[in-house]
């Protein structure tokens, strides 16, 4: 039985690796996810069915009940959630995994301290030792990392859904956080020596608090990076569980996500030109306000829906720059309608997708794909930038920071250095915005004052619907 | 000296495991390499589901729990429940995202 379980765990591990590899390619991605899910199911069923020792039926009942409840809630939530809310959901699910790892550690700590039970489990890890330091280390590390991931994910969730919309910073938060982290580590080391079971709950509380302190000062725009980082934390926490039990499927899954997640975090940071260090320790939007005052910027022109329709109708090439504002206004379907009606008139329409458009890299592609926009029309930044000089009209909907020229010209700007879409090279720019409020990063956009630019004020869905109606009459 | 030798012991006793970990780290990096940025979100979400494998540990804890130890059972129950949420929710939401790419 035990060897059969080992084989199952091996299959599970391979399926995780294969699944993730397949997810790196648009053609095989969906199948890859299913391969991973199949491996996971196999590992879970195998763990329950092939368990050797006799187990009370009550425990089996409880396990199955927990899985049943979790499956129903997880399935329904994942099916029902709107695609715009998806980053929040990923954050919550990540937090659940972190909490799971932390709880395992809490239980095992009590086992170690109160009974000799755990010794059977970790015997093969460090033989001939009364209290295995390796196992103890795994328990504490799993607890701390899992808890940080849990509370951090909850804060990230609250920030993304707008409950906590301003970064909250204690004075000298960087130093305070670092000292607190050292405190957490020191306290963990102290637990090695002192074997008072109650103290583990103190460590648990400290780790939870650190997770909150870690994420709270980070601005909303950096949340995708934070979620990705916490995602890899949970992977590491799972891997410590794998160490503890000598369980290879937990090890593979955990380490795979830990290392891939870390790399993904770094890649995302590069796309935004924000070093990871700055995300964690740097201030976004604080201080460094742009020196230019309103009077020097020039004036803002606005344009009516009718004029926009005329301009677009007689264009050859139109590029649409969608941003998160488009998704918030639920205007994905309308913009697809606009694209089709223009194409019917012989206008070539493309979408320019910035790597961080939306709330996560690739999020915008998902949102537009949901509205049936042709995959081939979504053009990535590096491919579309050379095309802007030949573009008649650029329509920016609900995007701001990704077209802000300050990223190139103003070294004091918080987004300075981030690659942007060069929309100012097009012949006309039309920016749809609800009002003159600053973008997600909280900074002003000089593009608004560009002589080639006209503002089309109003809610994206409403304005685009009117625009489509107007075009139909032409 | 005693401290150093205990660390060295820990290494030699866990040698295979340490090799395994290091190789797995490289596999993780290799698997992500060269992924187009449009797939970052689904990939992050898929990876999120995979670390839900921590549920195997939660089940293991439950299976080895003393049926009389109610604290342990309650915490274990919660752990399995949360782990399931992570696994099921993670895979389903990833599938929903990828479904849209597939249609084309």
Image (spheres, rainbow, N blue to C red):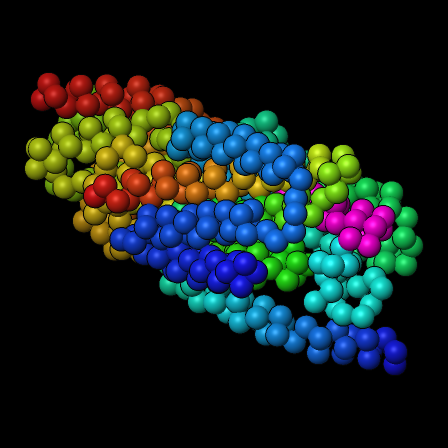
Residue A129 image offset from top left, x and y in percent? 82, 68
Q: Quadrant of the N terminus of chain B?
A: bottom right
Residue A63, quarter of picture? top right
* Outermost residue, front side: A54
- State the residue in front, A265 or A170: A265
Q: Quadrant of the C terminus of chain B?
A: top left
Question: Can residue A271 be spotted in the picture?
Answer: no
Looking at the image, is A158 positioned above or below residue A268?
A: above
Residue B8 image offset from top left, x and y in percent? 76, 78
Q: Is residue A100 magenta?
A: yes
- State the residue in front, A462 or A239: A239
Looking at the image, is A235 positioned above or below residue A55?
A: below
Q: Is residue A453 magenta?
A: no
Looking at the image, is A419 positioned above or below residue A398?
A: below
Does A394 sit left or right of A313 as displayed?
right
Decide whether the magenta segment is chiefly helix, strand or loop.
helix
Question: Can residue B64 be spotted in the picture?
Answer: yes
Residue A296 image offset from top left, x and y in percent? 46, 37
Looking at the image, is B30 positioned above or below residue A27?
A: below
Residue A107, quarter of picture? top right
- Give the residue at x 85% y 64%: A130
- Give the residue at x 53% y 63%: A3
Q: Which residues are magenta?
A: A99-117
- Give the residue at x 80% y 47%: A110
Q: How many marks?
A: 0
Residue A75, quarter of picture? top left
């Amino acid at each position: 039985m035990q060897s059969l379980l080992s084989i199952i765990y091996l299959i599970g591990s391979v399926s995780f690796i294969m699944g993730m590899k397949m997810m790196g390619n648009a053609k095989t991605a969906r199948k890859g996810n299913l391969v991973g899910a199949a491996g996971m199911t196999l590992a879970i069923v195998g763990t329950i069915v092939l368990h050797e020792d006799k187990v009370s039926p009550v425990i089996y009942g409880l396990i199955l009940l927990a899985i049943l409840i979790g499956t129903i809630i997880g399935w329904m939530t994942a099916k029902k959630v709107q695609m715009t809310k998806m980053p929040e959901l990923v954050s919550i699910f990540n937090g659940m995994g972190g909490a799971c790892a932390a709880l395992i550690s809490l239980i095992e700590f009590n086992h170690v301290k109160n009974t000799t039970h755990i010794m059977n489990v970790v015997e093969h890890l460090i033989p001939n030792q009364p209290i295995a330091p390796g196992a103890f280390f795994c328990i504490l590390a799993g607890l701390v990392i899992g808890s940080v991931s849990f509370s951090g994910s909850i804060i990230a969730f609250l920030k993304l859904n707008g409950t906590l919309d301003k970064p909250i910073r204690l004075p000298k938060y960087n130093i305070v956080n670092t000292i607190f982290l050292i405190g957490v580590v020191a306290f963990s080391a102290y637990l090695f020596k002192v074997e008072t079971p109650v103290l583990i709950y103190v460590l648990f509380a400290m780790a939870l608090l650190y997770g909150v302190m870690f994420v709270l000062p980070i601005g909303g725009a950096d949340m995708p990076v934070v979620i990705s980082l916490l995602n890899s934390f949970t992977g590491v926490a799972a891997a410590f569980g794998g160490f503890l039990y000598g369980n290879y499927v937990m090890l593979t899954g955990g380490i795979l996500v830990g290392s891939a997640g870390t790399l993904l975090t770094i890649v995302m940071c590069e796309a935004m030109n924000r070093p990871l260090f700055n995300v964690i320790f740097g201030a976004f939007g604080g201080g460094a306000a742009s020196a230019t005052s309103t009077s020097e910027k020039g004036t803002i022109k606005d344009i009516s829906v009718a004029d926009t329709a005329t301009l677009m109708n007689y264009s050859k090439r139109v590029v649409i720059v969608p941003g998160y504002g488009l998704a918030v206004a639920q205007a994905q379907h309308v913009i697809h309608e606009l694209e089709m009606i223009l194409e019917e008139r012989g206008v070539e329409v493309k979408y320019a997708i910035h790597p961080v458009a939306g709330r996560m890299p690739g999020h915008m592609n998902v949102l537009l794909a949901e509205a049936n926009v042709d995959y081939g029309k979504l053009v990535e930044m590096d491919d579309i930038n050379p095309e802007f000089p030949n573009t008649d009209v650029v329509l920016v909907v609900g995007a701001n920071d990704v077209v802000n020229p300050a990223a190139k010209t103003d070294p004091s700007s918080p987004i300075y250095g981030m690659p942007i879409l060069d929309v100012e090279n097009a012949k006309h720019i039309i920016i749809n915005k609800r009002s003159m409020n600053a973008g997600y990063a909280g900074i002003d956009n000089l593009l608004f004052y560009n002589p080639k630019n006209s503002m089309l004020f109003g809610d994206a869905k409403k304005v685009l619907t009117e625009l489509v109606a107007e075009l139909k009459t032409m | 000296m005693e401290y150093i030798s205990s660390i060295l012991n820990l290494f030699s006793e866990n040698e295979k495991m340490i090799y395994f970990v290091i190789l797995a780290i490289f596999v993780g990096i290799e698997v992500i390499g060269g992924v187009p940025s449009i797939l970052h979100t689904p990939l992050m979400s898929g990876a999120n589901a995979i670390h839900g494998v921590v549920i195997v540990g939660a089940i293991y804890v439950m299976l080895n729990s003393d049926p009389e130890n109610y604290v342990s059972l309650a915490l274990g129950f919660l752990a399995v429940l949360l782990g399931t949420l992570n696994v099921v929710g993670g895979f389903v939401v990833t599938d929903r995202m990828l479904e849209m790419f597939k249609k084309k």
